[in-house]
Structure formats: structure tokens, C-alpha cells
């Protein structure tokens, strides 16, 4: 998600790495707690977008926050353990 911002010079490699690391540290614990309560990944994504204002903000910063957060949530969803049946 952040590569195009790095390529354009809008973010340095270090800033992009720190942004990704911070996003995972902040979003993952909340997402896992919500999953344990039985929330769907869709509900978790919606809650993230609403709580950060990314769903209603039409400025570039809000869209960026939303895209980064949804990328983290999507990664968590894909990596979720699914027992074999």
C-alpha cells in the first residue's frame, strides 16, 4: 500500500516502515479482540473506518489512513487460522 508513496518521494523508506509497523501495532490487538467477541471482518473494517473518520473524510489524508488500515485488516483476515474440517 505504501510503495507508491515511497516511489513518489511522499514518504521515505523509514517513514513508510514506521507507518506500517505502527498500523499493525495499533490495529491488530483491537481486531483480534473484536474477532474473539464474534465480530465479522466486515464489521471490524467498518468500525475502523468509522472510528478513524476515514469513512467520512474526503481529504487525501483520510483516504490514506483508510487504505493503510484496510490493508492491515485484510492481511489479518487472510492470515487467520482456519481449522481443517
Image (cartoon, rainbow, N blue to C red):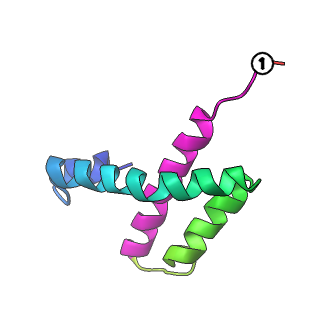
For image coordinates 73% across by 56% down, the residue present is 37
- Which residue is nearer to you in this view: 26 or 49? 26
Magenta: main secondary structure equals helix
Q: Is residue 70 magenta?
A: yes
Q: Residue at x 78, y 18 (%)?
A: 84
Residue 56 versus residue 49 in the image, above or below? below
Check the image and report above or below for 50 versus 10: below
- In the rendered image, which quarter is residue 56 located in? bottom right
Q: Is residue 9 left or right of residue 45?
A: left
Mark 1: which secondary structure? loop
Q: Exactly how many numbered labels are in the figure?
A: 1
Where are the magenta residues, as a range? 60-83
Residue 41 can be seen, yes or no: no
**At x 63% / y 68%, what residue is drawn?**
47
Q: Image quadrant for the C terminus? A: top right
Residue 79: x, y in percent?
57, 33
Query: Front-most of 79 and 29?
Result: 29
Residue indicated by mark 1: 84
Q: Nearer the viewer, residue 56 or 22?
A: 22
Whether 17 is among the magenta residues is no
Amino acid at each position: 500500500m505504501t510503495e507508491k508513496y515511497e516511489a513518489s518521494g511522499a514518504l521515505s523508506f523509514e517513514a513508510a516502515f514506521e507507518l506500517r509497523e505502527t498500523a499493525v501495532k495499533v490495529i491488530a490487538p483491537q481486531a483480534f479482540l473484536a474477532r474473539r467477541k464474534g465480530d465479522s471482518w466486515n464489521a471490524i473494517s467498518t468500525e475502523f473506518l468509522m472510528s478513524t473518520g476515514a469513512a467520512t473524510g474526503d481529504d487525501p489524508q483520510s483516504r490514506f489512513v483508510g487504505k493503510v488500515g484496510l490493508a492491515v485488516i485484510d492481511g489479518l483476515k487472510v492470515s487467520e487460522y482456519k481449522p481443517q474440517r
